[in-house]
Amino acid sequence: MAAGEPRRVGYLYVLPALAVYGLFLLFPLLHSGWLSLFDWDGLSPGTWAGLDNYVELATEEGAAAAFGHVAVLVLFFAVLPVCIGLVLATVLHRTRVRGLPFFRTALFLPQVVAMVVVAVAWQRIFAPDGVLNAVLGTPGHAWLGDESTALLAVGVVGTWVQTGLAMVLFLGGIGKISGDLFDAVRMDGAGPVREFRTVILPSLRPEIGVALTLTVIAALRTFDLVYMMTPQGGPGGSTTVPAYEIYQRAFHGGQVGSAAAMGVTITLLAFAVTFVITRISGGERR
């Protein structure tokens, strides 16, 4: 905004963006909140239900299982990729690997491949006659058809997809650290572990916050991997997640109000998690 222009002119500059944001994000979110207060099958007139849909979600076993499964996926989609990404980024930075752009691209590649392609490829790997059974010497085991391993198999794919994103973020963060800090800590006799603990880890706090935010949200909204790798929510519903439940209730079960309530709940959960991560990762910024 040019000097001397009224402050109100600044709001006019952002008005188009705010209009698009309100039309395509806020309005659908508020409309979903409104629908969640009705008992509606999507066709006939709905009846007012108040907060009954939310009360049912809190007491329903299927909804609790879906939120429990997504909590497990947060471990695979967020915690493990961040930890592995930190290790990979530190090793690649410290050892000065030749062909670093190649490794960076190769590890980031799962992020740009369509999830449908990823799901189909890993379905073949986990198949009874797939590569995994051949390597482990367990022919015939159906990893995706077993209640005890189906969710873990989906989680492993999530770890594979998200690790590259975390590693690229951390490599960019390490590149911004002053070389003087590394020289100082090495002159003090620090080894790789102390260098990581005293220099790299504190400096990467904002990047860790960004990586956790992106990967946790990816875990909370997971649908395509679950839908493609384990149709019908896996054996015994062992891989159902909130996004899958929303789809089933809205388009197959005629429970639009319940689906909207679950959508609002997972959205509020994502906001809360993002707020906490942002506060922790940026709490000591000046």
Image (cartoon, grey):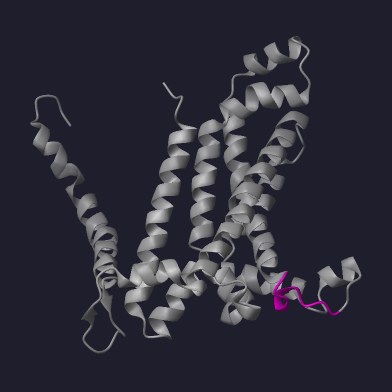
* Residue at figure coordinates x 57%, y 82% from the top left: 232
Asked if the stretch drawn in magenta spans residue 143, the answer is yes
Going 58% across and 35% down the picture, which residue do you hit?
172
Look at the picture and state if 35 lies above or below 13. Answer: below
x and y, in percent, of residue 255 in the image:
36, 81
Residue at 70 percent of width and 47 percent of height = 102
Residue that sits furthest to the right in the current view: 137
x, y percent for residue 2: 15, 28
Extreme residue in the bottom direction: 44
Please name the residue shown 65% across and 61% down the image: 155
Residue 7's x, y, as percent?
11, 32
Looking at the picture, tell me which residue is in the foreground, 195 or 216. 216
Q: How many marks?
A: 0
Image quadrant holding the N terminus, namely top left
**Image coordinates for residue 210, horizontal then vertical, percent:** 50, 41
Q: Nearer the viewer, residue 280 or 148?
A: 148
Observer-nearest residue: 107 or 86? 86
Q: Which residues are magenta?
A: 140-148
Q: Chief secondary structure of the magenta span? A: loop
Report whether residue 116 is seen: yes
Instruction: Tell me if I can see residue 108 in this picture.
Output: no
Does 142 sit above or below residue 82?
A: below
Is 286 inside the magenta-drawn segment?
no
Q: Compared to 229, does 270 lie above or below? A: above
